[in-house]
Image (cartoon, rainbow, N blue to C red):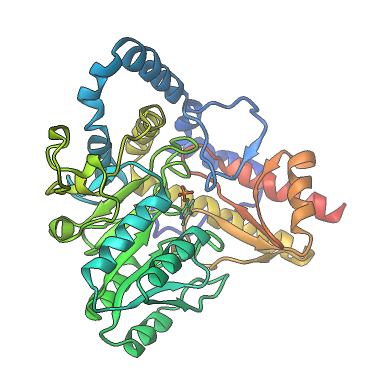
Amino acid sequence: MPSSPSGPDQAPPRLESRAEAKRLDATDPLAGLRERFHLPEPDLIYLDGNSLGRLPLATRGRIAQVVDQEWGAGLVRSWEHWLDEGQRIGDRLAQHVLGARPGEVTVGDNTTVNLYKLAAAALDHRPDRPVVITDRDNFPTDRYVLQGLAEARGGQLELLDSDIDQGLDLEHLRSALARHHGRVALVSLSLVSYRSGALLDLAAVNDLVHQAGALVLWDLSHAAGAVRIDLTGTGTDLAVGCTYKYLCAGPGAPAYLYVRRELQKQLVQPIHGWYGQRDQFAMGERYQPQPDIRRFLTGTPSMVAMAGIEPALDLVATAGIDRLQAKSRALTAALADLVARRLSPLGVRIASPLAAERRGGHLTVEHPDAAALHRALLSEAGVLADLREPSRLRFAPTALYNRFVEVWDTVERFEKLLRG
Ligand SMILES: *Cc1c(COP(=O)(O)O)cnc(C)c1O
C-alpha cells in the first residue's frame, strides 16, 4: 500500500494502478483546495505551475474589489492604506512562506529589479571586494544582472560550473571562495534550479559564504510555495523572488524582497526613489533613505496586480508550507518513480536529482524529441508541461491543485505517445 503524503520522512508513494492514485487523492488533506481554483478546462492536466500558477477563484473578486471600490470609489483616498500594502503582504509572506521576521520582507517591482537593487547594495557595501559569484546554470536574468553590475564596477563575475541535472556541487563554491580569498563581495544563487529542480542547502551555503566574509543573495522564485524556507534560522542575508509561480499571484504580480533586519540600515540600494525616502511626502531636497525595509522600495507599485498576491497566499497559509512540501515531494516522487519504470525503457531520461529531498517542486526529463512530445502531450494527451529547449521537459505538479491521478494519467498518456 502506498503511504499518504503526510511527511517528508515517509517512503515515497509508488503507484501501481490508477485506483491507487485515486485512493491517495481521497486521503490527501489538501485535496479540497483544488476547488478553490478556476478550472475552465477540467480535463486539462496543468503541470506548468512553476512558470505561471493557476488562478484562485477568490482572486477575481479581490481584483474586482480593488478596481471598483478602492480605485473607482475610493480614488486617491485609497493611498492611505495602499501605501503600506507591500509591507503588510511582505509580513504575511515572511510568516507563511519565507521563514522571516516581521519587517524583513516587502513587495514591489519585479524579481529582476529587486535582484539588481539588492546585489548593487551588497557590492556598494563591500567596495574593496571585486568578485561576485554565481553559477553558470543560474536563471538568465540573474546572470545578466550580476554580469552587468560586475562590469559596471570594474569587478569580476565568477561563473561556477554546475551540473545541469544535479545542480551546483558545493565543493565548487568552496574552492572558488578559497581561490578569491578576501575578494568576494557577494554570492548569488537560486535555491531551486529552474532547469533541473535541484535544491541547494540554504544553511550550508550561507555558512560557507559567511566564513569567507561575503554576503549571500538568494533567488527563491522556483522554491517559494513548494519547499520550506527558513531565512531567519539559516542566517540568510538577502533574498528575492517572484509571486506568480507556486504562489499563484498572477502574471506580473509584484515580487518580494527580503533583507535581514540587522543589515537593513547598512545597505543603500541604487534606485533612490521617493518610496524609499524617509518622510516621503515632505518632498525634501535630498534623498535620505527610510531606516527600515521600505528603503528598498522605488516608486508606485501596481495596486491592481498586487491584489492577486493575498487570495493565493490565503490558500498557501491554509495548507501550511510543511504540508505543501510533503505533498509536492510525494507527487514528484510518484512521477519520478513512474517515469523511471515505464518511460526510461522508451528513451526518457530523468534530468533531475533522484532523491526527492534534493529537488524542489518540479521534475525534469530529457528526450531528443522533447519539442514534438511537448506539442503532442498538449494536443493529444491534454497535458500542459513546460519545454526547455532543446531537449528537456519540466513537470511541476503543484500541491495546491494537482492530484495523484493526474500524475498517473500523465505517465500513462506519455507512454502511449512514445509507443505510437
Ligand atoms: C521566474 C524567475 C524569475 C523571473 O524574473 P522576472 O523579473 O519576474 O521576470 C527570476 N529568477 C528566477 C530564478 C526565476 O525562476
Residue lying farthest to the bottom in this orientation = 179
- Residue 3 image offset from top left, x and y in percent: 48, 51
For image coordinates 42% across by 23% down, the residue present is 58
Position of 80 relative to 255 (above/below): above
- Residue 364 image offset from top left, x and y in percent: 61, 60
Classify residue 361 as left or right of residue 177: right
For image coordinates 47% across by 35% down, the residue present is 250
Position of 83 relative to 359 (above/below): above
Quadrant of the rendered structure where residue 21 is? top right
Residue 353 visible? The answer is: yes
For image coordinates 37% across by 43% down, the residue present is 109
Position of 405 relative to 230 (above/below): above
Classify residue 22 as left or right of residue 91: right
Classify residue 236 as left or right of residue 312: left
For image coordinates 34% across by 49% down, the residue present is 322
Residue lying farthest to the right in this orientation = 420
Q: Nearer the viewer, residue 209 or 360?
A: 209
